Amino acid sequence: MDDLQRANDEAHTLIEAHYLEALEAVLDHRVDDARQAFSEFDAVVTAHLREEQEHLMPRLSAFEDSVARALGSGGFAGRRRLQRRLARTRHILARLNPDSPRLAEDILDALEMMWLVRHALHDHRTRERQVLYPRLAARLPAEERSAAGERLTALCQRNTAGAAAQATA
């Protein structure tokens, strides 16, 4: 496993930890904690997607057609679907009211949407493992993969520090 794949695995470990924290808060009906934890999760996922879109995909620009074919229409549609589900979950969590007689129903709505987010993230991760990272490994020199891995690691560290700062504020 090279530095880039290792950094991506670390990024997804961080994403998973944030997801589980948000899920636990929703399950415990800790509304404010759920909003905060989901906000942190959303920020980490969004930063990860942006990093791939802005810095990794362009490195394959000479091979974009083959990557797009390999990803299929679901590759980029999957990103949009994930972003829509993140937005929908934010909306559901924003309307949660601990004093509402509908709280149990709203919690179920939030859990259902979070499951759909998780499913979209799984699809994203599968495409990374099967298409994006093998193509990067095959086409980019080791130095470029290492530099890209360092960028992903730095991004994870910034997001971890930002989440910790928000949690203590």
Image (cartoon, rainbow, N blue to C red):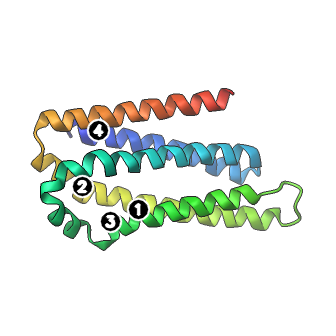
**Viewer-nearest of labels 2 and 4?**
2
Q: Which residue is labeled 2 in the image?
A: 132
Quarter-wise, where is residue 103 in the image?
A: bottom right
C-alpha distance separating marks 3 and 2: 10 Å
The quarter of the rendered structure image containing the C terminus is: top right
Q: State which tag comes first along the sequence, 3 or 2.
A: 3
Amino acid type indicated by mark 1: Arg
Instruction: Answer whether residue 132 is visible to the viewer in this image.
Output: yes
**In percent of the image, x 50 and y 59: which residue is there?**
118
* Between 105 and 41, the one nearer to me in the picture: 41
- Residue 92 shown left or right of residue 72 in the figure: right
What is the crowding at mark 4: few (fewer than 14 residues within 10 Å), some, or many (at least 20)? Answer: some
Q: State which tag comes first along the sequence, 3 or 4.
A: 4
Q: State which tag comes first along the sequence, 1 or 2.
A: 1
Q: Which residue is labeled 1 in the image?
A: 79
Quarter-wise, where is residue 148 in the image?
A: top left
**In percent of the image, x 67 and y 60: which residue is there?**
91
- Residue 74 shown left or right of residue 29 in the figure: left
Amino acid type indicated by mark 3: Gly
C-alpha distance separating marks 1 and 3: 7 Å
Residue 2 image point, x, y percent = 20, 38
**In percent of the image, x 17 and y 52: which residue is there?**
60
Tag of residue 75: 3
Tag of residue 27: none
Amino acid type indicated by mark 2: Leu
Q: Which residue is labeled 4 in the image?
A: 6
